[in-house]
Amino acid sequence: MATIMDIIRLLTETPLIFVSIAGLTWGILGGALPGISASITMALVLPFTYTMDPAQAIALLACVYIGAEYGGSIPAILIRTPGTNSSAATVIDGYELNRQGRAGEALGISLMSGVIGSLFGLAMLIMLTEPLSWLALAFTPASYFGLGILGLSVIASMSGGSLIKGLAAATVGLMIATVGTDPISGVTRFTFDIPDLLGGVEPVLVMVGLFALTELMSQSGSTNTAQLNQKIKIKLPSLAVMNRLKRSQFIGCVLGLFEGLTPGGGGSIAAFMSYNEAKRWSKTPHLFGKGSEEGVAAPEAANNTVASTALIPLLSFGIPSSNSTAVLLGGLLMHGLIPGPRLFEQSAQVIDSIYVGSFIAIIAQIGVGIIILPACIWLVNRPRPYRAGFIFALILSGIFTLNNSLFDLGIALALGLVGFLMRIAGFPVLPMILGVVLGHMVESSYRRSLVLSGGDHMIFLQDPIAVALLSIALIFVVFSLSREVRDARKTRIEEARS
């Protein structure tokens, strides 16, 4: 835990304030662009963090995540198009308020609810990650292997209803992770005598290709021409309004906490669950769907809470619970930081920078959100080909700056095409990304464990932490498989009846 002197040093001796506000601003702009999700917004800036100090780079990514979660509510309220997946629930009542001429009020409620949710999530992040970090001393290579398998088991809940397709995508990701140099023997593998592959395929190339480039290809045929009102201004809610909204905001914060901790949960599920529960406990449930202020406050508090609480399993155990945390995990690996318990032992400054930087971004969110709204409206009003061209140029320039390599550009473009074909065929891309990101941890921990045991696989059953983690992973897979079988049986019964 950072001391007062550590915080002062971070604020005075490092560019953390500038980095936090810059990340927040970029996140809001990216989140406000329909179709450019929080994970894509983070992936776009990821290559530019390659030469940054690791602590500042990870803080930047965390602040982008915070900004994108709020930014997604802007087009959701104004043009009935969620900027991010987690802002889809905000559309229901946010756009109705806009139709009633209360767009400024809806934007203000969204902003303040997001700030409250973010502060609550940050408090939970600080309180829960520190105690969990003490488990670091008990982790062995066998434990890290179990941790990696548990992270891969998240695939079971992120496979879009097809566990087989999710596992197939993850297998491809694990295969990509084996390209390069063997972590134990140093022998080169699957490089095909290409020098650029000796270091393997960097996770950042996979994420940018499968997230950003794939999304650009998917949007290329869209003809959405919705326009925003240029004169709209944010109107912050009064204390009386905030008092009326406290119940719905509390519901959003609590559900955001639990969903952030749950693998595969994420902001979208938290937002819709909080919307339903806010309606259940509201004194005016009949207003929901017709322009309810509570219908905006609850989902916005929830998805902004998730932006912080989703980092708890990532920082404590190295388990990404969403696309955005998978990108952040890639950022940690790119800077040579070991995700999971060791991070608290070896890189405490990174953790402190995340905490302090996130707090700065959350407090600055009120002012930046008000100031940046005209820029968001201007961006969304640009013709889609111009926006796509700008983003494409940003992607290519960012990738090239990593190693000044045209080969990297070719890999990212090829992976973008692979992701586009996967989307057409119904294969989820996140399992593939997790396979790439976690593949090195799983393989190296597995090999080290066998070296220590002399090739005896019983080492994985003799380590209590490894047994516990592997058992939880098995529960995840069995539960997801049984749910998939149950849903398939239900579908067949309904088809037979019809």
Image (cartoon, rainbow, N blue to C red):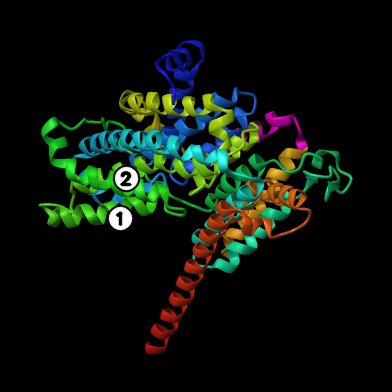
> In the rendered image, which residue does mark 2 sit on?
302
Q: Residue at x 48, y 72 (%)?
A: 484
> In the rendered image, which residue does mark 1 sit on?
273
- Which residue is farthest front? 462
Figure quadrant of residue 200: top right
Name the amino acid type tagged 1. Met
In the rendered view, would you say 409 is above or below 360? below
In the rendered view, would you say 484 is above or below 111? below
**Neighbourhood count class around disc 1 (C-alpha, 10 Å): few under 14, some 14–19, many 20 upward:** many
Q: Residue at x 52, y 42 (%)?
A: 40
- Disc 2 from disc 1: Cα separation: 9 Å
- Say which of 338 and 237 sits in front: 338
What stretch of residues is rendered in magenta? 390-406
Dot 2: element? helix
Q: Residue at x 53, y 53 (%)?
A: 221
**Neighbourhood count class around disc 2 (C-alpha, 10 Å): few under 14, some 14–19, many 20 upward:** many
Q: Earlier in the sequence, mark 2 or mark 1?
A: 1
Q: Can residue 430 be seen at all in this image of the molecule?
A: no
Say which quadrant the N terminus sits in.
top left
Residue 402 highlighted magenta (yes or no)? yes
Residue 229 highlighted magenta (yes or no)? no
Q: Can residue 286 be seen at all in this image of the molecule?
A: yes
Q: Position of residue 262 (x, y in %)?
A: 42, 52
